[in-house]
Amino acid sequence: MSKLTKKIVIAIDGFSSCGKSTFAKAIAARLGYIFIDTGAMYRAVTLCAINQGAVSEDLVNEQAVVALLDGVDISFKFNSEREASDVYVNGECVEDQIRSIEVSNCVSRISSIREVREKLVALQQQMGRDRGVVMDGRDIGTVVFPDAELKIFMTADAKVRAERRYAELTAKGDKVTMEEILENVISRDKADMTRAISPLRQAEDAVVLDNSYMSVEEQMEWFMERYESLVKE
């Protein structure tokens, strides 16, 4: 089959602030696929939990988080100005709110709650049931779509990732320090890899992409070599 007729699932897992979403968006645009940012979905639930007082940097009320799940409707809508999808919760755009450092500091604890993962994994599997999707997160190739035709595991030096995140937040006017961001990156790595449910790990059949010193264009060239080889088989 040619790449025009063979639709596949592309699963991208990896550490925080590796540029997974930027990479996945570029792939989806190139192939005409649907892009699903699963990390944004966990951030959306985290934002709801923060707003309802169910979680903070000091505590998490798992029972309260689970109780609010049925009232959380997550959707994506294309933003023509950004040429990307925005995240909506119950019809309200929360794209900017979910990228805050407060959400970043709490999302690992929310994503470790079994009921949260079960709800969002089921939704993600439904979104990708017809193939032709690019999905990024922590457990896409290991849990959500273990049968994905192409699995990529992204990594980069922690300091490089912190620098990228710092530049992103300060560009939006957020008052953060480099030290605060680096601490968040390191703590999230540990939390993601050691959680009891769906920990971050490389799938056995995933290919590794270390993009510490690669441009988006170089990453796309790397990807297209592997994608074209796969769909021509």
Image (cartoon, rainbow, N blue to C red):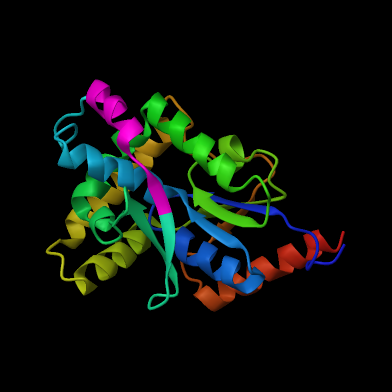
Image coordinates of residue 179 in percent, x first then y, are: 18, 56
Identify the residue at image location x=18%, y=54%. Answer: 180
Identify the residue at image location x=69%, y=70%. Answer: 224
Image coordinates of residue 29 in percent, x first then y, are: 58, 71
Reply above or below: 164 against 123: below
Reply above or below: 44 against 195: below
| Viewer can see residue 19 | no
| Viewer can see residue 40 | yes
**Depth check, front residue: 171 or 66:** 66
**Depth check, front residue: 75 or 13:** 75
Residue 119: in magenta span: no
Q: Main secondary structure of the magenta part?
A: helix
Image coordinates of residue 60 in percent, x first then y, are: 20, 28
Left or right relative to 158: residue 229: right
* The C terminus sits in image quarter: bottom right
Left or right relative to 226: residue 221: left
Residue 69: in magenta span: yes
Residue at far top of view: 63
Reply above or below: 199 against 150: above
Magenta segment: 62-75
**Depth check, front residue: 144 or 200:** 144
Task: Name which quarter of the figure residue 190 lies in.
Answer: top left
* The N terminus sits in image quarter: bottom right
Identify the residue at image location x=60%, y=72%. Answer: 220
Task: Name which quarter of the figure residue 195 lies in.
Answer: top left
